[in-house]
Amino acid sequence: MKLVTAVIKPFRLDDVRDALSQIGIQGMTVTEVKGFGRQKGHTELYRGAEYVVDFLPKVKLEVAISEELVDQALEAISEAAKTGKIGDGKIFVYGIEQVIRIRTGETGPAAL
Amino acid sequence: MEEILNLRYALDTFYFLVMGAFVMWMAAGFTMLEAGLVRAKNTTEILTKNVALYGIASVMYMLVGYNLMYPGEAVNSIWPGLSFLLDSDHDAASVLSISGSKWYDGAYYSGRSDFFFQVVFVATAMSIVSGAVAERMKLWPFLIFCVVLTGFIYPIQGFWKWGGGFLDTLGFADFAGSGVVHLTGATAALAGVMMVGARKGKYSRNGRINALPGANLPLATLGTFILWMGWFGFNGGSELVISNVGEANAVAAVFVNTNAAAAGGVVAALVTAKIILGRADLTMVLNGALAGLVAITAEPLGPSPLAATLIGAVGGVIVVFSVLGLDRIKIDDPVGAISVHGIAGIWGLLVVPLTNADATLSSQLIGAGVIFGFVFTASLAPWALIRAMGGLRVTEEEEYRGVDVSECGLEAYPEFTSGAQ
């Protein structure tokens, strides 16, 4: 079991969600976040004075999936989130020790 | 004949009152413009200042200001003499006893309508000050200064021109107040800004100029449009009468020129900002509209519509450079009032001789110089006195928290700023 966390551009979210649905992923968690990477922020101008917006709005997407889906999921996210411009984001993959479905008490892969 | 004179008197009075009500509405324009260009934490205080200054101006001008500015029999051409409260209005019999070519020598509109039209002008002058000193000045010192400006400083220099004092005798031309109203407000604002200092964080030690972006640009834009509309009363009403073909045409020409100058200011400021700053800076465009309006106010009747557009356009260019220039010398004016009303006002005064043969460049320079010199000195003194007595400025911590809390105890957006539960 793996947890795939992707930080992506907000306007790509719908496409990423569709792409993940296509490969049979049934659930995900989305958070609005702010951050910056190598693209840094951007500058805005107000009455001739520049100011830097350090933290840009991004969307963080989390999906817990079984091992065999990981490669497909990474490919789906990468393709759907990609614009080719700076700030497209990153994907992180973690191992999951345990999953419990609260309603039924199921555990492990059956709870995904 | 008597019927027609009755009607003329009524029509000119009606026109004057409606134009005055337009100018009164400019108070709303200034309020919205300033509320849009300050940060959210300083909104309630700027609203309080604007509505309070309008009230104070109305009271002071009725008590003493109007009589100082229009004394009837002045002591001399510099000091009008002190008297209080308003005279009764003209009685019908004496008005109607004058007719024919002598009509305009008598009272041809209500005296109360004249007071009403004048009182809304003094409020305009004071509104100019409030934006410039926003976000760091204490509320009550500002209101005390408001008493001094609207009761004394504005009326005395107003007497010199519009009340028939020495600037009028000298040939100084200022149709609706580029100098008497706008330069006066801007000069008082400059003195206030110099005494209160820049907002914390505006200028870094290393010489960097920081942006402190306004909270609500829709409100700032609405305020600009309200001012633009009110200006038709400001300039259009300053023709004073409308009840014959010549005067009606003149009022229409003033309306057209006033609109043209604002339009010229918008376009010029937009293009200038794009060229100089690389972006279409909305706040500069809004300042451009107002600079165009201020510039045409000294002579909105003489120019052709094209000339009026160009006069406004130059105002729009000047205001962008002025805003940037004042920041260079650390004059922190959050809304650009000194640039819009002062620098564009001087431009408006100096360009009058091009379209008004009665004015000369020297008389315009003297007029601008006298107004600036007097208002600056007369404003600096009370500002300095207040600073010495109790302080003009909120503490650093209060400034960080916002003057809404420290000065008014009330936040404009309690669920959005720090007051949320």
Image (spheres, rainbow, N blue to C red):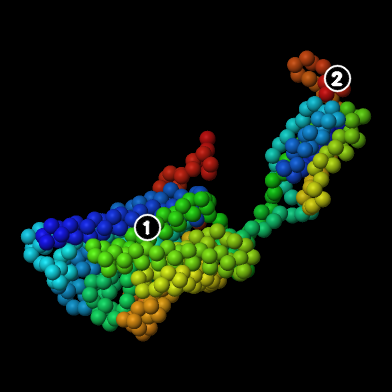
Give residue B230's mark.
1
Secondary element type, mark 1: helix
Which residue is at 23% across, 71% downward? B163
Badge 2 crowding class, 10 Å Cα cut-off, few under 14, some 14 to 19, many 20 or more, is few
Residue B369 or residue B409, whichever sits in front: B369
Does A61 sit above or below residue A82? above
Which of the chains bears the disc numbered 2? A
Give residue A110's mark.
2
Q: Position of residue B319 (x, y in %)?
A: 50, 69
* Image-quadrant location for residue B341: bottom left
Whether residue B405 is visible, yes or no, is: yes
Q: Position of residue B190 (x, y in %)?
A: 42, 69
Whether residue B376 is visible, yes or no, is: no
At label 1, the amino acid type is Gly
Q: Position of residue B370 (x, y in %)?
A: 33, 78
Q: Is residue A31 shown left or right of residue B48?
A: right
Which residue is at 88% across, 27% downward? A66
Which residue is at 22% across, 75% downward? B164
